[in-house]
Amino acid sequence: MSAATGHRLAAARFARHAVLVVTSGLMLLPFVWMVSLSLKPPEEIFSSAWRLWPSTFYGAENYRAALAAVPLVRYLVNGVLVCAAIFALQILVNLPCAYALAKLRFRGRNTVFAAVLVGLLIPPQVLAIPLFVLFYAVGILDTYAALILPWTISVFGIFLMRQFFRTVPDDLIQAARLDGLSEFSIVWRVMMPVARPALVAFGIFSVVAHWNDLFWPLVVVHSEQLATPPLGALHFLNEEAGSDYGPLMAGSVLITAPLMLAFLFAQRRFIDGITLTGIKQR
Amino acid sequence: MVDAAAIRESRAIAQPAALPAPPYRAAASEANQAAALVSPAVMLMVVLLFGPTAAVVAISFTDWEFGAASARFIGHGNFSALIPDPVFWKALRNTLLYVAIVVPVCVGGGLVLALMIEANDRFRAFYRTAHFLPVMSTIVAMAVVWQTLLHPTIGLLNHGLHVFGLEGRNWLRDEGTVLFALALIGIWQNLGVALVLFIAGLKSIPRDLYHAADIDGADSSLDRFRTVTLPLLGPVTMFVLVMMAIRAFQVFETVRVLTKGGPNKASEVLLHLIYVESFEFLRTGHGAAVTVVYLAIVVGLTMLQAKVIEKRVHYA
């Protein structure tokens, strides 16, 4: 390699890092801005000179005001409850179906699988009107059940888990049958442990989708004490009428933090989960 | 890429099961047990997925409204009512414009940044995380943050413009800029998805091909890119393109939080129109008709995606 090429390569490397540092900075800017504003007193927020770190630390006041204005902790607990219930029920409903589709022979198998593939085409917002009417008729509007039930069936979950189950060797299943396990116990005691990587990916995808969803909670929930984090953030914004920015940013930090921290702790899994499941939003 | 592999494999549905045929009685018991395993999911699929989809199509052909005791079949009435409806066309036009801005920037930017990140031997994890973080964030809360970034007086954007002696605007209240402001947020929100999909795609290119290209005399990195990377990334690019389009068509949160479709419907989009018509104005038939249009667009895009993936099998 000549010296000239070496220089050119070094220059290219420098240019790449320069561009990436700038774009990374731009992507992170809203987060930095959010935290910065959440620590500032109003007069600094409205001052024309912008500084990263507040000259008067006002974080305690802002975060206290945010927690006093709306039940933020309640929103977060609701988010955890709803997402946990959705994922648990998704496993309960969809794993057995995925196993049967992958490993058992029965009449109608191809029909069920075709239905799963067709189901993948339907975006969830399409279901809003009829499900709203149905839940009204059943009398479960404005309950946790309304937030959870529509997502118990996940054709995407069935599809993903079926694909994974197909790669599990049949010998493993035969051995379990010889040990006297029923097909039902095979799902939980043989397949589920084996499918952990796929299950984790699906879980991350499910939790991220439902933690961040606004559309459906907005349709079915009116009581503030049932609000999930996004709906709560919307309440908060309306409550504050959009001028008390310090507490508003503090609230945004508290609402965004849980998922972000989880992501930073298990990045590889999150990115795999999104890549693996990237095909579908929900 | 794992997802594509999964789908490719799904194309083997029609093939017979890999298990050896069990003896007759075992087969009957297996079928019974299979029915028990499948039926909860199938029942819920009918009640919560296919039933509602059929219902929304049916409602779109009636004059039904929430709470009304009866509904009348009015044929394509709701759909022909959309044709002279300026709000519908504005929502459709805005959605398409939003998609037309967000998708190319995310796909192009995602590809270029993925190539740059993968070409480095240091800080790759940091760059990837930084670009992916917005995907994980709760967009409703971050929309509030964007509102302050774009704020006419305290916003960082206008502060920045001021430094260069430029006049800022009230980006989210100005009919001429509101959609671009939302598209900017959309790009920020979605770029990371395209980026990680491209990184996955780049990793799946066999190293041997680069050696082969070297032997064939492709000595500059541009040559290697043109002869190896680009052709092999072509199908991935198509896949990412359609996926980003589907994501972009679902724009709702930022509109709801920041503009509610305003000012003067300048940022009205399909999903938000569906929400407002169906659940605020309770014009159910009308909302259902817009829903059917939205369904048709997303189904069309997804089928296109399936076609693309099918094609990929022949490439790879």
Image (cartoon, rainbow, N blue to C red):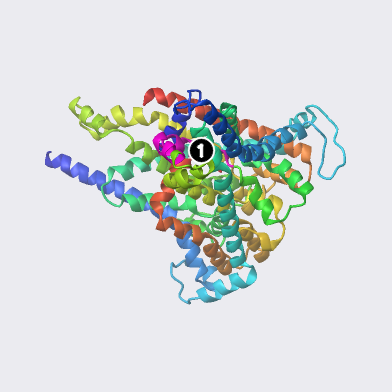
Asked whether B192 falls inside the magenta stretch, the response is: no
Q: Residue at x 55, y 60 (%)?
A: B148
- Residue A133 in the image: state x and y as whole percent: 76, 44
Instruction: Describe residue B270's horizontal placement relative to residue B123 as left or right.
Output: right
Q: Residue at x 65, y 52 (%)?
A: A147
Q: Chain of mark 1?
A: A
- Amino acid carrying label 1: it is Tyr
- Residue B270 in the image: state x and y as whole percent: 65, 40
Q: Which one is in front, A159 or A282?
A: A159
Q: Kindly indicate the quadrant of the structure image that contains residue B147.
A: bottom right
Label 1 sits on residue: A99
Q: Main secondary structure of the magenta part?
A: helix
Q: Which one is in front, A91 or B71?
A: A91
Q: Residues within 10 Å of mark 1 (few under 14, many from 20)?
A: many
Q: Which one is in front, B208 or B286?
A: B208
- Residue B22 in the image: state x and y as whole percent: 48, 28
Q: Kindly indicate the quadrant of the structure image that contains residue B198.
A: top left
Q: Quadrant of the C terminus of chain B?
A: top left
Q: Quadrant of the N terminus of chain B?
A: top left
Q: Which one is in front, A107 or B122?
A: A107
Asked whether A160 falls inside the magenta stretch, the response is: yes
- Which residue occupies the extreme left position in the image? A2
| Residue B206 appears in the rendering | yes
- Residue B195 in the image: state x and y as whole percent: 41, 43
The magenta stretch spans which residues?
A: A154-177
